[in-house]
Amino acid sequence: MNLVRPLVAVKAKLGEMTALTSLRSPQNAPASVMVELLNSVTPTGRILPALVRAAVQAAYNGRPLWLDTTWLATDSPLARQPGGALEFLDHSIESAAQAEYGLFAPDVAYFIPVVRLGATEDELRRVRLLIEHQDRDIVIRLPQPSGPLHELLERIDSIMRSTGMRQGRVHTILDAGFVEAVRPEQTTAAAETASALSDLLGPASTTLLAGSIPAERTTYVTTERDRPEVTLWNEVRHARTNEVNYGDYGVTHPRPPRSDGNPRTPNPYLCYTVPGKTVLLRRKVEKGDDPAERFTDLVEELVERNDFAGPDYSWGDDELTRCRRTGGKTAGSVSRWVAMATSHHIEHVARRSAADL
């Protein structure tokens, strides 16, 4: 059984946006991508233009980005824009698309808004205005656990009424967050919720989202970690008749890290996705070391592994190959490392079947 449309959730950072603009997934097996907007995205910064480019490219490839404001504070630079973050982005993406393609519009919306379960009426009014400006689906993001089922379904029905949406145009994300190990009660609760959502919204309308990348890296020894998000998804879909889509958090921890604003010398690391597992590689930067050189040492180990996908697999894998000592490229920043790993990960979930995800 192939995946209907897997979802990868990424943070709105420079590395992730670089990966999105470099995707070359086969058109017959695309992945949906949800971008979680962060307070660090500003109208005058480097990330916003990269996000806009990624959104334009995704729309013209027929797979618009899902844009989520869950992590945006009310006083963040994007939230303070007239009309709010989503209206500002809608205008920015549409203007960029027209500058690049003229009046030739894509066959889909420029992006799909993700709505919080606890969205205010003002937020829902703004989503409705987006839909009136350009017809599009919406996504409702649900935390797990999310309370009694009847209350959850009533809230979803209320959101649909407030936004004017109907069955077939509404998707839901059942967000399990960070998963260290799969618990039977978690599987049961997710399966029951997914089944109720399918009855309300239709089959294949729900994505189970989870991630297992640790928040901190504590060892410099190369290790392999199981991906319990895959196990959880398989158990949920086997527990019910209707299909549930697979979703994960790519190569980063589900929650965005807190920053104290102090710059640090990065210790090179890479989270490399292979069937059922993540390979975690890391190198320590000693005094006087060049992080790019230590990353090159890491890459030399990775490309010699039997589970390395090869340079033709994705943009990220090609870049990794070029970062070998004989490749002529270097990479000394976190954003560059995350870009390569994210590119490989999205290609991985877009190509794989359920049996070898």
Image (cartoon, helix red, strand yellow):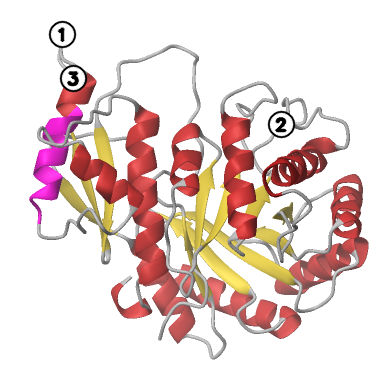
Specify the segment rendered in magenta.
Answer: 295-305
Where's residue 332, x and y in %? 28, 24
Which quadrant of the figure has residue 337? Answer: top left
Where's residue 11, x and y in %? 53, 41
The answer to whether the residue labelled 2 contacts the one labelled 3, judged by CB atoms less than 8 Å apart, is no
Quarter of the picture holding the C terminus? bottom left
| Residue density around tag 3, few if under 14, some if 14–19, many if 20 or more, within 10 Å | some
Query: Taking 355 as reference, is 35 left or right?
Result: right
* Distance (Cα) linking label 2 and label 3: 34 Å
Disc 2 marks a residue whose amino acid type is Ala
Q: Which residue is mark 2?
A: 73
Quarter of the picture holding the N terminus? bottom left
Q: Which residue is mark 3?
A: 285
Give me the residue at 10% from left, 35% from top: 326
Which quadrant of the figure has residue 289? Answer: top left
Give me the residue at 57% from left, 46% from top: 54
Q: Which mark, residue 288?
A: 1
Residue 58 within the segment the image draws in magenta: no
Query: Taking 152 as reference, is 346 left or right?
Result: left
In the image, residue 241 sits, relative to residue 10, either above or below, namely below
Disc 1 marks a residue whose amino acid type is Gly
Where's residue 345, x and y in %? 36, 55
* Distance (Cα) linking label 3 and label 1: 8 Å
Decide which of tag 2 and tag 3 comes sooner along the chain: 2
Can residue 153 be spotted in the picture? yes
Nearest to the observer: residue 154 or residue 8: 8
* Distance (Cα) linking label 2 and label 1: 39 Å
Which quadrant of the figure has residue 38? Answer: top right
